Amino acid sequence: MHGRASLRNVFMELHKYRADLHLHTVLSPCGDIYMSPTAIVEQAKKLHLDVIAICDHNTTRQVKVTQEIGREQGVFVIGGVEITTQEEAHALAYFENDEQLDKFQEFLDEHLPHIPLDEEKFGYQLIVDKDEEIVGEEEWLLWSALDCDLDTLYDKVHEIGGLFVPAHVNKPASSLMSQLGFIPPDIKADALEISKHVTKPDFLKRFAYLKKFMFTKSSDAHFLHIIGEVHCVLHMYDLTFDEFRKTLHGEDGRYIDTEPQEKLQLLFG
């Protein structure tokens, strides 16, 4: 036992926080028109989700309004983004505060190719406020790959103070497995996200060399009814970003259950 945190944990119990750490809003070109920040938070609350993360493709511009609504509704909203790397693999980045989000948005604006959005082919990329009024649009196609590789993006996210989690690493498209053919044993990451198509035990039977990592599993929802369909449970001491960081790193007994027994049920009435 070392330090104040460890002493505190002797007298505190781990709490369970239901989390869906990969959600898209209407700002993502693949996001349904009904995926407004208000609708997402309301759905999360109905499902008794404690934590959600907004991870639109290559943009953070819908995060802050969702966090504001989340504070009002009692849902902890983590600010994130789903990055498309130069390898065309997807990775999630999570940030603690507005300053970090703004710095990474500047980086995204510098490195996203200026390919005009074809709305008929890809759909809309809308920015909406808490009243679900359209207040802006993204001009450039957000699905494009940045001109930065995995290691460069990990370093930039960490330079700003964020967390880096390669997304749905086992999917047959837009993943480490699909783009590289394998998951490098020396991959620079804070954790790994697996998709709903595999359990953590089965995944580690094939890739035991990755057991050093904590794993997450989330819905990757682009539609309201998909939110919470897949979720994980964070076992940590408080509902803060610092606790989330320590949980991804498995510090002081914190851990993530990717196969929770209870299924989320909508509350009616």
Image: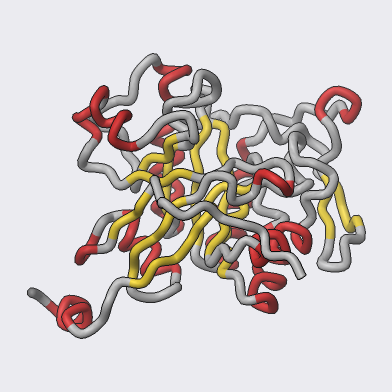
Residue 46 in which image quadrant: bottom right
Q: Left or right of 222: which side holds 137?
A: right
Which residue is the extreme one toward the front? 269
Give me the residue at 46% from left, 55% from top: 262
From the top left corner, tell me how far across and down residue 160 is, in percent.
Answer: 45, 57
From the top left corner, tell me how far across and down residue 53 is, in percent.
Answer: 57, 56
Q: Left or right of 215: which side holds 143?
A: right
From the top left corner, tell me how far across and down residue 132 is, in percent.
Answer: 87, 61
Pick the residue in front: 250 or 188.
250
Identify the image quadrant of the N terminus. bottom left
Which residue is the extreme one toward the top? 181
Give me the residue at 62% from left, 48% from top: 23
* Whether residue 226 is visible: yes
Pick the residue in front: 260 or 180.
260
Q: How many marks?
A: 0
Residue 210 in which image quadrant: top left
From the top left corner, tell me how far across and down residue 41 is, in percent.
Answer: 69, 63
Q: Left or right of 175: which side holds 248?
A: left
Give me the residue at 89% from left, 58% from top: 135
In this view, 6 is above or below 179: below
* Whether residue 106 is visible: no
Residue 14 in which image quadrant: bottom left
Identify the image quadrant of the C terminus. bottom right
Give me the residue at 56% from left, 29% from top: 147
Q: Left or right of 129: which side holds 31?
A: left
Which residue is the extreme one toward the left? 1
Q: How is the image coloured?
A: secondary structure
In this view, 155 is above or below 239: above
